[in-house]
Every structure is written in structure tokens, then in C-alpha cells.
Amino acid sequence: MRLGSLAAVGFLLMSLSACGGHETEATTHPATVIAPTVVARSIAFPTIDSVPGSIVSDQRINLSSRVVGFIQSLDVQVGDPVERGQVLVRIAPADIDAGIHQAQAGVAVARAELADAEQDAALYSDLSQTGAVGGQDARKAAVRRDVARAGLERANAVLASAVEQRRYITIVSPIDGIVVRRDKRAGEMAVAGAPLLTVESRQSLLMKIFVPEDSLARLHKGARIRVVFDARPGLPVHGIVQDIVLSGDPLTRRYEVNIALPQDPALLPGMFGRTEIPFGAAPAVVVPAGAIVDRGGLQGVFVVGPDNVARFRWLRTGRETDEALVEVVSGLAAGERILARGDATLADGTIVHTGGSL
């Protein structure tokens, strides 16, 4: 009985072992997927000169006071948005008002002097005709009248200037923008011409670059230029050459070029980028951007061989075109078949059934 039990147990173990072996053999079969493929091709890829630059605002305005006085209010902070016409600074009007009163008093004095001089001039004119006074006295009276008249005009001009100064006790923003600098605070003295605030517009941005002489010959006003920013490498923009300063720096031998950028809330003054100035074309292998797989910070594609087996291959890639084609610098030849859509979860050695290439 004991021998029979041992034989049964042995048979059972042999059966389980056999079953496990068949299961392992089944799981070693390669996976199979149905996926489209595409053939890597060679195109005339534009050769470019990559020139670094930074975004600047085309409207950066330093606000200063035209009058001298204590700052009554200056409430905006750096980073605050401001609107065109918004009051940013108020200057205490006491000194301005005192100047107006003084000018008004000067006008009153000048009017009185003119009235007195006109009476004397009229009197001496009548007396000179009767011979009671000499003609020289009459001429002196006329000169005094003319001087008094000029004095009144001068006093009126001083009053007009004083009244005009009162318009400048409030400083408003000339543009919609952002406060990027504040040089004074409420309670401090505003001096004519000294900066108080700096306001920068976000509506009109430029890419400022400095190009060598050979690149300058390939640029013209109105040219469309591709710009790539480090902060958003996959989202290039296209700008238009706005200004070319045809006077180079004698040390660097480079020329300033300003490229107008499209309105985009993601673009900010100070951002670093690179402009791509084309200067010809050269053959290059390209693949669709969607075929690229990122593994551990490196890029590659799944190459499908004649046996329909997908094998991952590392690539060294270059630029991307506006048609979402990526330049392959090394690792792939034209004519090789790859998966059209990259899948980071796909295992190496997977069999691909396509039913025809894309």
C-alpha cells in the first residue's frame, strides 16, 4: 500500500513537471502586433546657421517726472499689470500751486504797470502836440508803454507755464504692460528727468540677435525666420525680420537684427532662444516625429527587418521640420522600415504584421 502511494505521488510530480514545461515553452513565443510602418527616406534638408538671442520688448518705457516735488502716491509694485491711461504716480501739488499764485501776482503787477504806462504815453502825446513838453519826453513815455506791454506778455507766459506744470503732477501709463522696475517710493523727492518707473509691453516682442557678416547677406527685411526657445523646444515660432542695423560692432564684427515675434502668452522678455537662418540644403535621412521613442533620455526607433521582427535602435537626431519630420544624424539609413508610431512599451523582438506600409 505504501509502495503504491509513492508511485502515485511520483507519477503526479512527473505530470505537473510536464505540464509546467509546456507552459514555459508557450510563453517564450514572441509577441505579435499589428502596426503600420514607414520607410525612412532622404530629403533635401535645409542647412541653417543657428544664432542665439533673447526676447526684448519693443516698448520698454522709462517714466519720469517733468516737475520737482514730493511723491504723494506711487502704489504699483514690480510685476503689477497696468493699463494705458492708468494713474501710476502723483506728485504733491503744493509747490506747483505756489508757483501758479506767484505767476498770477506777476500778471496783476504787469497789468497795472501797463495801464499806468499807457496813460502816461497818451498824456505826453497830447502835451507834445501843444508844445507843453518836448518830443523826447513823449517818446520816452511811448517806450515805457511798450516795455510794460512786453512785461505783461512775459508774465502771462510765466503763468501759462505754471498752469501747464500742474498737468504733470499725475503720471499715467502710456501702454498696456507690466511694471518691471521701480526707482522711487511715496514720500521721496521726484526730480525732473529722473526715472520713477519702467513699464514694459507684452504686446510687441522682438527677438534680438547679432549675426556675422556672412549671415547678414542672407537676411532681408520681411524675411520669415524660425525661432526655437530652450523653454519650449518642441514649439518653435516664426518671426518676421523687422530691423537690420547696418552698422557692425567693430570688436565682434556682428550686426544687430530684430525679429518681430507673434503674440503668444508663453513668450516673455528675457527668454533665450535660437534663430535658424537657412543658407542652403543637404541630403538627410528623416523619420516622422511620431516614430521616435524616448528611453532614458535617449531617442530611437523600432526597425522592422525583412523577417518582420521589430528591434529597437538608438539614433542621434537633429532638427525637426515644420512637417513634423526629424533629421537622423546617425543610426539609420534611407530605405529601412520602421514603426510609424513609436511605442515605449513594445518589447524588442516583437513580430509586426502591417498589411502594407504607410
Image (cartoon, grey):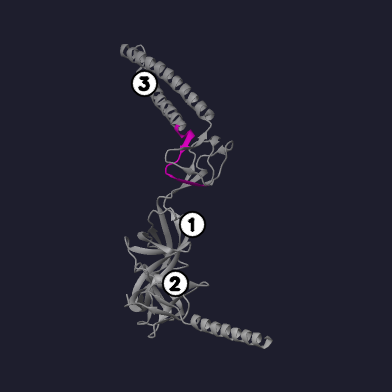
* Nearer the observer, 153 or 253: 253
The residue tagged 1 is 270
Q: Position of residue 279 (x, y in %)?
A: 35, 72
For badge 2, the amino acid type reads Asp
Q: Position of residue 144 (x, y in %)?
A: 40, 22
Q: Secondary structure at mark 2?
A: loop
- Nearer the viewer's eye, disc 3 or disc 1? 1
- Give the residues drawn in magenta, as a range: 167-180
Sequence-wise, which precedes: disc 1 or disc 2?
1
Asked if residue 357 lies in the magenta stretch, the reply is: no
- Badge number at residue 142: 3
The residue tagged 2 is 343
For badge 3, the amino acid type reads Ala
Residue furthest to the right: 2
Sequence-wise, which precedes: disc 3 or disc 2?
3
- Nearer the viewer's eye, disc 3 or disc 2? 2
Residue located at (49% from left, 33% from top): 169
Residue located at (36% from left, 15% from top): 124
For badge 1, the amino acid type reads Gly
Alpha carbon distance from label 3 to label 1: 68 Å
